[in-house]
Image (cartoon, rainbow, N blue to C red):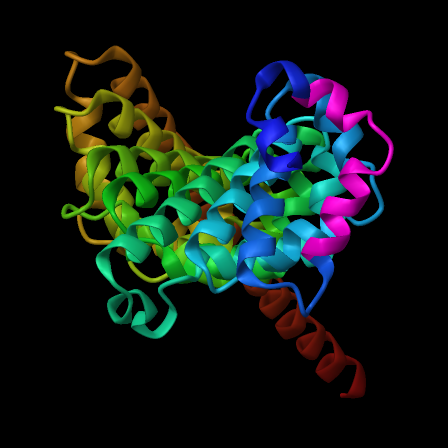
Amino acid sequence: AIKTLTLNKKNVIQLARTRGVISSITSVLCRVDASEEERTRCINALMHLCVPEENWRLVYLFPQTAEALARNMADRYPQIRYAACLALSFLAKKNRKEVVKNTILMHSIARVLEVDKNGALERTNPQDRKVFIGSRLCALKMLLHLSKNKDISTKLARADCITTALARIASTMELAANILCVAIITNLTRHPDNASHLVFHAPDLLTILVAGTSDNSDQEICKCSLYALQNLSCTGSIRQELANAPDLLASITKNAFKTQFPEQQLSALHTLKNLSDDPFNLVTMTNTPGCTATLLALANDSKNGMAQFLACDTLATLSHWLLTLSAAKRCKEKSSLVAGIGGANGNNKGGGSDS
């Protein structure tokens, strides 16, 4: 009866405020012995109650709502899982901080993302597979929405279950889902406080970003990956780690020469410029095949003013470090020579005094 009433849009706001409605629905969803039919009816009723914006805060504040959603997002029945994911996607818009802080919900979302773990989707029928993929897409869109908020970005980036799941599923899904996955990672890199954590505590994400900049990647994925690497390179404490990451500099160098994709080219050049600001990256960058040659070619190309400026700026920085290193070496050699001469004179005086 409650499910039927929630089908009418005019009823949902009043029903959410009717005593006992939401609490009874969530109590059934939390019961281990509830049948599939009971859970299906209750989760659909809850989903309908979550649609109006006026209900988003109210519904989530009920004590058992988060637990009910977390349990049913991990349900083996695809329709129940999809309805739970959809309900949470609505509630997350007004309860961002509470959702990200809830460990049970984060683990449930990660489980939805890894629905195809060990090829599980291949063992389901086409209809169920479509619903499971829809649930995963719903979870990715929800994470994309959450990752855009700077107030919760640091908390989301430190949810290890989420970052691990994103690293595992990246480039293994359909194109739309793969783009969403990389876009979420890119949003997380926008917050400066996340850079060090993502590089040192979630290294697989860096591997995913480097792979996303390859020639075989979709252009949107490549652009997002380059933006993410550019964001990370703004943090000085991890520039050496980035420069020494396998294939990162080589891939960035190739993208810096892609004049047919101006946005990607400029992003790659910004990354090279940021990495060159660390003097310890001098040897790594100059030893990367094609890096210096690409910068020289772009510095002599006046067709793209910004690309030319960035290339010249990067070369100037590298030259500065070379001059500094050379001057330091000459100073050291001079000091050694003076010390040697002083030591020789001292020995001669000492000999004369003894005689």
Q: Residue furthest front?
A: 1
Residue located at (38% from left, 39% from top): 180
**Along the line of sight, the residue nearer the viewer: 244 or 131:** 131
Residue located at (70% from left, 34% from top): 96
Residue 204: x and y in percent read: 44, 62
Q: Is residue 113 above or below residue 148?
A: below
Residue 13: x and y in percent read: 71, 19
Residue located at (15% from left, 19% from top): 301
**Along the line of sight, the residue nearer the viewer: 80 or 267:** 80
Q: Is residue 22 magenta?
A: yes
Q: Which residues are magenta?
A: 12-29
Q: Residue furthest bottom?
A: 355
Residue 337: x and y in percent read: 54, 63
135 sits to left or right of 266? right
Q: Is residue 1 magenta?
A: no
Q: Is residue 291 above or below residue 304?
A: below
**Along the line of sight, the residue nearer the viewer: 130 or 258:** 130
